[in-house]
C-alpha cells in the first residue's frame, strides 16, 4: 500500500529519514529552522533534530555554501538548502570552483559528498530576480550531478541516493510543484542516473523535466484527442544525461520536441537536441523543435509571465507543426 | 612610489634550545632553496603555468606549521609551496607535481597552485582569492559537530580581505564559535595593488575585531614571533573553541608570479625589506647568542640543496599519466568513498 502526500511532505519525509539514518547528515540554510523553511519543507524538523542539525544560517550564500563543502571534506554529509536558484549565483564560485573540482584537482584524494537543494522556476508572479531556471548552468559542469524531481515519488526518494553519492549533487525543486499531490509506494527507491518514460506513445517524443513535466503530460492528453500519440520522457537527471532512454524513444517515434523552462539560447534543450542530432539524425522524420522560455527577464504581470513560459498550447502547436513536416 | 616605511629588522635573543632553532632555520632554507630551484626550472620550461613564490615570507609558514598538530586541518592558497613542504608532503611529491608528473601529490592534475595531501590533512592549494576561508569554516564545523579536537589553520593573503568570502567566513566562524585559526599573510601587495589602494580600513585586526574575534598583528619576518603567536593562538582556539585572527606582516621579495614585471613598487622598498629577510636575521640572532656557526649554517644549506637535487631527480624520473586516464578522478570511483 502506498501513501498519498504532497511533494513538500515527500521532501520533508526524505529529510527526516536521512537525519535519522546517519548522524553525519545535517541540514543548513536560510530559515530552515525557526521559520520552517521558505517553502515549509523543513517545518517541524528543528523540534525533532535540534538547532545543530537543522542549522539556520545568515543570508550569506557564499559563506554557508563554502562551509557546507568544507564540512563534507571534513567527513560530514551536509544537505545545504539554498533558498532559490536565483541566490545560488552568489555561491556559484564554491559550487563550481570547489565542490565540482576538488576531487580531480587533488588527484582523487578528496571527495565532496554534499547535497545542495534549491527551488527553481517561474509562475508565481515574483518577477525577474526570483523566477530563473539556471539548472542548465550547473548541468554544464563536470564533477556535479544535477537532479530535477518532477514527481512526488522522486521528491521522496532521490535524496537517499544523492546522499550516498560521494560527489556533489544538486537537487532542483520547481516552485510550482510543492503542492503537487501524489502516490508514494511503500518501498520507495529510485536511481539517480536514468530518465523515465512517464507516458508511452508512438508518434513524437516529448522530452522534458521538472516543472514542465505536468504541462507536457497535459499537452500529450490534448494531442491524443487530435490523433497524435506522444511519448513523454522525464529526464529526471540533468547531468549526466541518460542518452539511451532519450534515443530509444526518438528512434521509435522518429520525431522529437524538447520542453524546458530555461531560456532557449545555450540551454539544456539545446544540448538534448544536439545529442539527438549526433546520435539519431538519420532516424528523424522531421526537424527537431523545442518549447522554452522567451528570451527576456521573466515579467511580473500575470499575462506577460504566462506568455514568457512554456505552456500547454505552445507545446501542442509546436508538436502539430512538427507532425506536418517531412524531412 | 617611494613612500614606504620598513620596520627595523627583528633582533633579540631566540628563546629556544639550539636543536629546535636550527630545525626551523633548516625549514626556512628548504623552502627557499626549493623555490629558487623552481624558478630555474621554470626558465627551462620544466615547470609551466603560474608559479607564485613565497621567497621572503618563509618565517610565516615555518613558525606557524611547527605550532600545529597532526590532527589539525590546513587550508592554504596558490602561494603554498612552503606550507605544503612543512606540513610534510615531501619535496619529491611537490616537485613532481610542479613538473606535472603522476607521481606528484595531485597526480599532475593541479600543479604549483593545487598541492593537496589527504594523509597530512592538507586541503590545498586553493587558487580563488578568499575561496579557502569558507571551506576552513566548514572543516571546523565538521570537527565541532563530530567532537574532534582539532583546529583548522587557514592561510590567505591580505588581498582576500576585500572579498565577500572573507567577511562571510569570519562571521560564520565567530557566530558558530568554530575552531578556525585565520592566518592572514599581509605582504602589502595584492598582485600589484597596495593595501592602502584597496581598503578603506588598512588595520586588518580592526576588521577581525568587528566580528568579535580576538585579533593580533605579528611580525611575519620573525620566525620566533610567528611561532610563539601561533602556539598561543592555537591553544586559545582549542581551549575556548572559538576562532582567532592573526595578521602576519611580511613581504614577498619576488614578483607576484612569473608573469609580473613589478611596475607597481619601488626597487628600494624591496631592498629595504630584504634587510629584514627572515633567514639571515634569524641566523644572525642565533650566531650572536652562540647557537649557530657559519659551518653549521653551510651544512644546513647544503642539506637543503641535496634534498632539492634529489627532488628534481625524482620529478625528472617521474612518468606522465596516460591520456587514456584523462577522465579519471572527475568523479569518485565507485566504492572508494
Image (tube, coloured by chain):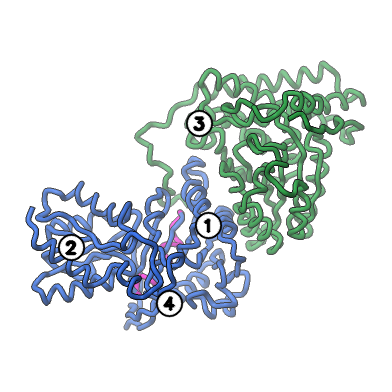
B24 to the left or right of A140: right
Give me the chain letter of mark 2: A
Q: Are marks 4 and 3 in contact (CB under 8 Å)?
A: no
**Which residue corresponds to mark 3?**
B103
Q: Which mark is residue B28?
A: none
Residue A135 drawn in magenta: no
Tell if the residue under mark 1 belongs to the same chain as the one under mark 3: no
Q: Which residue is mark 1?
A: A90
Q: Quadrant of residue B89?
A: top right
The residue range painted magenta reads A152-167
Residue B179 appears in view: yes
Left or right position of B213 against B117: right
Label 3 crowd bin: few (<14), some (14–19), many (20+), radius 10 Å: many
Q: Is residue A5 left or right of residue B250?
A: left
Mark nearer the viewer, 2 or 1: 1
Residue at the spot 56% in from the left edge and 33% down from the top edge: B112
Mark 2, secondary structure of its residue: strand
Using the numbered discs, state the Cα–Cα distance from disc 2 to disc 4 in whole angstroms.
Answer: 29 Å
Residue annotated with mark 4: A8
Q: Residues within 10 Å of mark 2 (few under 14, many from 20)?
A: many
SS type, badge 3: loop
Q: Nearer the viewer, mark 4 or mark 1?
A: 1
Q: Colour of chain A?
A: blue
Sequence order check: which comes first, mark 2 or mark 1?
1
| Residue at numbered disc 2 | A205
B121 vs B8: above or below: below
Amino acid at each position: 500500500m502506498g501513501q498519498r502526500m504532497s511533494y513538500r511532505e515527500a521532501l520533508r519525509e526524505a529529510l527526516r529519514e536521512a537525519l535519522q539514518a546517519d548522524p553525519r547528515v545535517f541540514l543548513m540554510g536560510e530559515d530552515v529552522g525557526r521559520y520552517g523553511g521558505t517553502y515549509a519543507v523543513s517545518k517541524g524538523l528543528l523540534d525533532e533534530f535540534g538547532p545543530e542539525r537543522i542549522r539556520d544560517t545568515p543570508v550569506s550564500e557564499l559563506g554557508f555554501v563554502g562551509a557546507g563543502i568544507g564540512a563534507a571534506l571534513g567527513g560530514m554529509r551536509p544537505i545545504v538548502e539554498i533558498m532559490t536558484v536565483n541566490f545560488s549565483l552568489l555561491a556559484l564560485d564554491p559550487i563550481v570552483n570547489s565542490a565540482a573540482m576538488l576531487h580531480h584537482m587533488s588527484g582523487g584524494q578528496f571527495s565532496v559528498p554534499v547535497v545542495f537543494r534549491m527551488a527553481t522556476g517561474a509562475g508565481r508572479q515574483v518577477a525577474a530576480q526570483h523566477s530563473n531556471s539556471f539548472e542548465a548552468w550547473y548541468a554544464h559542469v563536470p564533477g556535479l550531478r544535477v537532479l530535477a524531481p518532477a514527481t512526488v515519488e522522486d521528491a521522496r526518494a532521490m535524496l537517499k541516493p544523492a546522499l550516498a553519492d560521494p560527489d556533489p549533487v544538486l537537487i532542483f525543486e520547481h516552485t510550482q510543484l510543492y503542492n503537487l499531490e501524489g502516490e508514494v509506494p511503500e518501498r520507495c527507491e529510485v536511481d539517480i542516473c536514468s530518465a523515465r518514460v512517464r507516458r508511452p506513445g508512438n508518434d513524437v517524443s516529448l522530452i522534458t523535466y521538472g516543472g514542465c513535466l505536468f504541462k507536457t503530460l497535459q499537452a500529450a492528453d490534448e494531442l491524443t484527442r487530435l490523433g497524435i500519440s506522444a511519448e513523454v520522457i522525464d529526464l529526471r537527471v540533468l547531468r549526466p544525461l541518460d542518452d539511451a532512454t532519450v534515443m530509444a524513444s526518438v528512434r521509435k517515434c522518429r520525431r522529437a520536441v524538447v520542453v524546458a523552462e530555461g531560456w532557449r539560447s545555450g540551454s539544456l534543450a539545446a544540448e538534448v537536441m544536439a545529442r539527438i542530432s549526433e546520435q539519431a539524425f538519420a532516424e528523424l522524420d522531421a526537424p527537431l523543435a523545442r518549447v522554452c522560455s522567451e528570451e527576456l527577464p521573466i515579467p511580473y504581470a500575470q499575462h506577460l509571465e504566462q506568455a514568457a513560459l512554456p505552456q500547454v498550447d505552445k507545446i501542442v502547436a509546436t508538436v502539430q507543426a512538427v507532425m506536418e513536416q517531412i524531412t | 612610489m617611494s613612500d614606504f616605511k620598513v620596520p627595523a629588522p627583528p633582533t633579540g635573543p631566540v628563546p629556544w634550545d639550539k636543536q629546535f632553532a636550527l630545525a626551523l632555520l633548516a625549514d626556512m632554507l628548504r623552502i627557499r632553496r626549493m623555490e629558487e630551484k623552481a624558478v630555474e626550472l621554470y626558465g627551462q620550461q620544466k615547470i609551466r603555468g603560474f608559479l607564485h613564490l613565497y621567497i621572503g615570507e618563509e618565517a610565516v609558514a615555518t613558525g606557524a606549521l611547527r605550532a600545529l598538530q597532526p590532527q589539525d586541518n590546513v587550508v592554504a592558497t596558490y602561494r603554498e609551496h612552503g606550507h605544503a613542504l612543512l606540513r610534510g608532503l615531501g619535496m619529491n611529491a611537490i616537485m613532481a607535481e610542479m613538473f606535472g608528473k603522476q607521481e606528484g601529490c595531485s597526480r599532475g592534475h593541479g600543479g604549483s597552485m593545487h598541492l593537496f595531501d589527504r594523509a597530512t590533512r592538507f586541503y590545498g592549494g586553493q587558487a580563488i582569492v578568499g575561496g579557502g576561508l569558507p571551506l576552513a569554516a566548514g572543516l571546523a564545523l565538521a570537527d565541532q559537530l563530530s567532537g574532534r579536537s582539532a583546529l583548522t589553520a587557514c592561510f590567505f593573503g591580505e588581498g582576500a580581505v576585500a572579498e565577500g568570502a572573507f567577511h562571510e567566513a569570519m562571521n560564520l566562524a565567530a557566530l558558530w564559535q568554530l575552531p578556525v585559526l585565520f592566518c592572514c599573510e599581509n605582504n602589502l601587495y595584492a598582485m600589484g595593488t597596495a593595501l592602502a589602494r584597496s581598503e578603506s580600513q588598512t588595520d586588518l585586526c580592526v576588521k577581525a575585531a568587528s566580528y568579535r574575534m580576538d585579533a593580533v598583528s605579528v611580525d611575519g619576518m620573525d620566525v620566533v614571533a610567528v611561532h610563539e603567536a601561533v602556539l598561543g593562538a592555537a591553544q586559545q582556539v582549542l581551549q575556548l573553541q572559538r576562532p582567532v585572527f592573526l595578521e602576519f606582516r611580511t613581504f614577498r621579495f619576488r614578483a607576484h608570479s612569473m608573469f609580473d614585471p613589478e611596475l607597481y613598487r619601488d626597487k628600494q622598498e624591496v631592498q629595504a625589506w630584504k634587510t629584514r629577510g627572515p633567514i639571515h636575521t634569524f641566523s644572525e640572532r642565533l650566531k650572536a647568542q652562540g647557537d649557530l656557526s657559519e659551518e653549521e649554517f653551510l651544512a644546513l644549506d647544503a642539506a637543503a640543496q641535496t634534498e632539492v637535487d634529489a627532488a628534481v631527480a625524482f620529478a625528472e624520473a617521474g612518468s606522465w599519466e596516460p591520456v587514456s586516464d584523462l577522465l579519471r578522478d572527475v568523479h569518485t570511483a565507485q566504492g572508494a568513498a
